[in-house]
Every structure is written in C-alpha cells, then in structure tokens.
Amino acid sequence: MGLTVNGAPVALPEDPRVSLLDLLRDRLGLPGTKKGCNQGACGACTVLVDGMRILSCLALAVQYEGRSITTIEGLGTETALHPLQQAFIEHDGFQCGYCTPGQICSAVDMVAEARRGVPSHVTADLAEETILLDGAELRERMSGNLCRCGAHNGIIEAIAQSLETMA
C-alpha cells in the first residue's frame, strides 16, 4: 500500500527515513511545496493530509500510508485556479512567491478549521458556534506561515476575499 498524492497513487519510498517533503519534491517532482527552514518554523512546506494542514518537513512519508496528500499542484489547474490562488494574485499576496504554496495550503484548512468551530488563541467567545474570521483571527490562524517579504497584508486580504467562495 502507498499513499495518494493529488489524486494519483504513489508507492512509499523503500527508505523509511524519507520525509514527506523530500518525497514530494525530490522523488515525485512536485516543486510547489517549498523547503524553507526544514525545521517546522516557517510553514513553507505546508501540505494537506486528508484535508488537514501539516508541515511536510517534519513528517516521514511512511507515516501517511493509505492517506491522501494534496499539494499546491493539486488545488487548482492552470485554467481553473483555486479561489485562494486567484485571490492571492488579485491582492498581491506574494512578492517572491516562495512561501505562497504553503500559505495557500494552510489557508485552505484554516478556513475549514474555523467552520468546524475550532477556536484559536484569539477567539473571543469559545461558546459561539460560528467563529468570525476577522483580521485578528486570520492573522493568528496563519501565524505559523511566515512571509519574509512582508506580504502579510495582501495574504490576509486574499484569504478574507476567498471566504465567500470557499465551500
């Protein structure tokens, strides 16, 4: 048994020490997922596992046997971008673009987390069933993804715009 990457079956590497990040980039040729700090501090390597965000540099590929991995390449197509990809373009949510794939993958699950009612550190009322994703909530929930160029305002604007279109 292997795992599924962007809808395609993939065999697990023979070496159990291969990180999920290295499997994606080096062995499967999916360069969208970036190797930033390689220590779990920057979020550039964020991918979705069964729809939930993880840092692929801190994960061994063998840990995800039987699971479904989605990278930035699996979110949209060249002719039909994911709403967040389009919003990042419209709001200049990137400068060098290195962190962008991780930002977008993280934002996809961040929105889902809030809709499931998972509170953040800044959620004012833990009893509320609906969490308002205002600027403070968005910034807190995206704080694990760093942008060294300082495009955070555009990133937050892009995510805020996409909330209506993301089901």
Image (tube, helix red, strand yellow):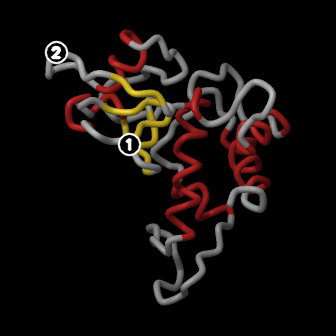
Left or right: residue 55 compared with residue 123:
left
Q: Where is residue 48 in the image (x, y as percent from the top left)?
A: 45, 42
Q: Mark 2 points at which residue?
A: 14
Q: Where is residue 159 in the image (x, y as percent from the top left)?
A: 70, 51
**Which callout, 1 or 2, points at the residue further toward the start of the chain?**
2
Which is more toward the observer, 2 or 151?
Answer: 2
Residues tagged 1 and 2 counted as in contact (Cβ below 8 A): no
> Which quadrant would residue 61 be assigned to in this image?
top left
| Up-down relation of residue 109 to residue 149 (above or below) | below
Q: Where is residue 22 in the image (x, y as percent from the top left)?
A: 33, 17
Res. 54 mark: 1
Callout 1 amino acid = Ile
Labels 1, 2: front one? 2
Which is more toward the observer, 123 or 20?
Answer: 20
Which is more toward the observer, 32 or 78?
Answer: 78
The N terminus: image quadrant? top left
Helix, strand or loop under label 1: strand
Look at 37% across and 37% down and name the residue there.
55
Look at 44% across and 68% down and name the residue there.
121
The CA span between labels 1 and 2 is 22 Å
Callout 2 amino acid = Glu
* Mark 1 residue crowding within 10 angstroms, few (<14) / some (14–19) / many (20+): many
Look at 69% across and 43% down and name the residue there.
155
Helix, strand or loop under label 2: loop
Left or right: residue 115 compared with residue 151:
left
